[in-house]
Image (cartoon, rainbow, N blue to C red):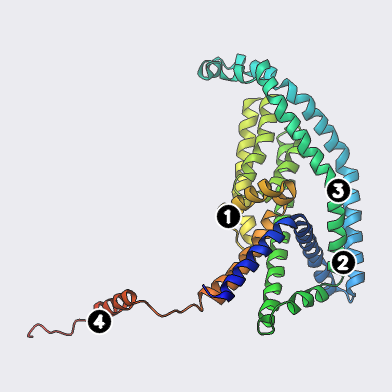
Amino acid sequence: MSGRTLLGCIALVVLGLLAWELRWVLLVLFGAVVLAVALDVPITLLRRVLPLGRPAALLLVTGSLLVLSWLLTALLLPELLEQIEVLSHLIPQVPERLNALLVRLPKLRELGGGLIEGLFDGSSWAQLKPFGSQLLDVAGGAANSTIQVLLIALLAVLLALDPRSHQKLVVAATPRFYRPRIQMLLGECREALGGWLAGMTLSATVVFLTTWAGLALLRVPLALLSALVCALLTFVPTVGPTAGTLLPMAVALLLVSPAKMVQVVILRMVLQILEAFVLTPLLLSRTVNLLPTVALMAQLCLGALLGLPGLLLALPLVVVLQVICEEVLVRDVMDRWNPPLPQWGSHAVAMASEAAKPDRCSDGE
């Protein structure tokens, strides 16, 4: 190993340790970039329609978002809080309601063999108390991240106000021969991240409205809360839509009837099929197509390492890393890597070429 290679390895190790020590700073910075891109999408669309400067367009977009948030809060928050209170009163009554349901379904009671009764007895609830305290600790940690959220919002506004200067700063930190390539790479990352954010936001909005309308038509209690949970879990690949179905399904089973639960399951299955095979491919056809396994593993890893902020920013990070890997690792490194073949490789290529040649021998020879 040459001295230059050894020095490069040491530099990579030092940079990795430094990035780990500054992981929360980097997480806040990346969150600000994601929010800035989310603001830049409507700003760009608005500037194409109206002759506005970037500061005026940013002020108009943020003002419109604040007004819309205030209207939605005034309209939906009272009902949402009421449904949350109903759900909090319903949770302690789950064992009694399940027992009453099992009384009406004796075959299900015999099939369960007393498993459900043992699951919801007093000892099981006592065992769940430590888990409840852990949930309270998680909620307290999420409340303590308010300062980080405010800092992300401030940095996002500054980035959205003058993105070209920050882009020039990143380009200037790269070697001269690679600056055109890095500038194009930044543009592709911005386009992919902006398209993914816009597509997933529209998909979650459609899921929220259709689920709310469907549950309201079926007269299922807690329709607004269930639709909101389903919309938020749309951002979790593969398992999110299925997990979102559990709340309306349980509410329909416990508060209405098993027949109503079947109707809720059918409704959610139809909506999931339309969202997975029609809506999401249509909205994300021009952006990065995330593999469900990669997205889910990224959320699990970043959630375990960084908690709730890492879980929320896992998918945007995967979108950016997928573009970087495709452009840098595949096109700039692997596609241009053409080393000389070893001796066994040259022999194999020669044998393959010889076998591919047509047989020139005629029948008379």
Amino acid type indicated by mark 4: Lys
- Disc 4 secondary structure class: loop
Q: CA distance from mark 4 to mark 3?
A: 70 Å
For residue 214, above or below residue 361? above
Look at discs 2 and 4 and give the one toward the viewer: 2
Check disc 3 and report the residue beneath it: 146
**Which of marks 3 and 4 precedes in the sequence?**
3
Q: CA distance from mark 2 to mark 4?
A: 65 Å
Query: Looking at the rendering, which quadrant does residue 322 occupy?
Result: bottom right
Horizontal relation, residue 184 to residue 115: left or right: right
Image location of residue 42, percent across then percent down:
81, 66
**Which of marks 3 and 1 precedes in the sequence?**
3
Look at discs 1 and 3 and give the one toward the viewer: 3
**Which of these two is toward me, 210 or 288?**
288
Task: Say which mark, if any, is on residue 158.
Answer: 2
Characterize the local packing of mark 1: few (<14), some (14-19) or many (20 or more) Cα atoms within 10 angstroms.
some
**Which of marks 4 and 2 precedes in the sequence?**
2
For residue 308, above or below residue 83? below
Characterize the local packing of mark 4: few (<14), some (14-19) or many (20 or more) Cα atoms within 10 angstroms.
few
Image location of residue 253, percent across then percent down:
66, 27
Amino acid type indicated by mark 2: Leu
Check disc 1 and report the residue beneath it: 294
Please give the name of the residue rendered at 79% of the width and 76% of the height, measured from the top-left corner.
Answer: 169
